[in-house]
Image (tube, rainbow, N blue to C red):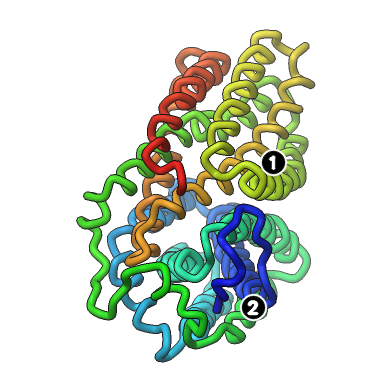
Amino acid sequence: MITLTAGFGRFASPRRSERSALIAIWGVYIVQGQLGGLTFVALPAILRTKHVPMEQIAVFSAIILIWALKFIWAARVEQLRQQMMGRFGFGRAIFLAELVIAGLIIGAALFPFCSILPFLTIFTGAAFLASVIDIATDGYLIAHFPPSLRRLGATAQVGGGYLGFALGGSFLPALYDNAGWPVSCLVAGGVTILLSAPLLTLAHTDPSGLIHAVTPVTQRWRPNLLWALKRREIQAGIAMIIIFDAARRMTQGLGALYLLDDGVPLTIIGALNGIVGIGAGLMGTVLGNFCVRKSGSSTSLTFIAIVTSVISGLASFAILLGHRGLPLFIMLLFLESLVMAAGFVVLFSRVMGLTSPRQPGLDYAVFQSVSAVVAAMAGFAGTSLAGKAGYEAAFACATCIALASIPILKLLQKPFEGG
């Protein structure tokens, strides 16, 4: 799929075949984001309009555990991905899996809202299949794209996620209000099929021989989770994710809560989280891609950590100012969303370089599972601290963690300077 002549230099640009692969990958990640928006935003909101109890709706949040636990089945998925090359074809297999997800979403239109069990079953199954697709796509991206172009894959992953989540969480609820649930499901299923269609253009084999040229992959190799966890690259990557993500995730959802407590109307907060947040997220993906292209992922990781500490510190100061600091705080929320997205691109680009060519899908799944766990734990810690000591204390704590992460990140990356 990829020619070695594309080069491994920092400023290499994608060729036509690589651009075709990126289009297909963008489609996959947008579909993933749409499913997340539909599962965690649209469907709970629609169920609430049907007076379904909140304690039942809350059960849908447990579906996120699938993404935190996907490292468990990642080895088998990675093995199947490697076996598909040259046989059935990666693109065909993923397209068929996407068709099943589309069928599940369309099938949800057949059930009334009197019980959440059918919807919980359908979207749990769709989420599991989506996690399998995610593992395989990540492995394909890392294995077939030279290191200099993986930043484009990370950009697709983050940017596609933002676009898809906006589609599933904002557009589909609006469509439901005007056309009803069956039409919303048909549209979501149709979009899934449409965005997955470019997968059929992917070559069934690896004509460039890139995998065999740069890796010791053999047909007998079996992806192994324990082997991954023993490697110092994986251990360093896990440590990077924990220290880098802790500060950012700690305050991720606190901004909206603070504005709500300060008397800002819920409609304005919704607009900030929606249009402004998504806009900042997409701008951040572009910024992250630019940083990695110009400075490399290692330097960019340190830069994002510095900026995060500055934003968190200013946010804590704005809260101490009270209502007078509200305009500054709102501006900082925009910057936080922008830097958050840029940080995802930079971090994902960095840890992609730490995966083994023998099992990139499995190694990357471990990193993503760790990121999901950090998000849950840091978010809980930040919310708890804000409730006990105030919002300013939570942001101040995040500032200290971000500052402490700067020398630690440099220390962790030192053995892998060329990665």
Element at label 2: helix
The reply, left or right, for residue 53 in relation to residue 311 is left
Residue visible at 78% across and 66% down in the picture = 178
Amino acid type of the residue that numbered disc 2 sits on in the rendered structure: Ser
Name the residue: 32% across, 72% down.
217
| Residue neighbourhood size for the residue with mark 2, other residues' Cα within 10 Å, grouped as few (<14), some (14–19), many (≥20) | some
Secondary element at image label 1: helix
Residues 167 and 131: in front is 131
Amino acid marked by disc 1: Asn
Q: Name the residue at 58% across, 26% down.
A: 306
Q: Residue at x 22, y 49 (%)?
A: 230
How far is mark 2 from mark 1, CA to CA? 37 Å
- Nearest the viewer among 42 and 335 is 335
Q: Is residue 116 visible?
A: yes
Q: Mark 2 — residue?
A: 17
The N terminus: image quadrant: bottom right
Residue 320 in the image: state x and y as whole percent.
65, 9
Is residue 187 placed above or below 155 in the rendered structure? below
Name which of mark 2 and mark 1 comes first in the sequence. Answer: 2
Which numbered disc covers residue 273?
Answer: 1
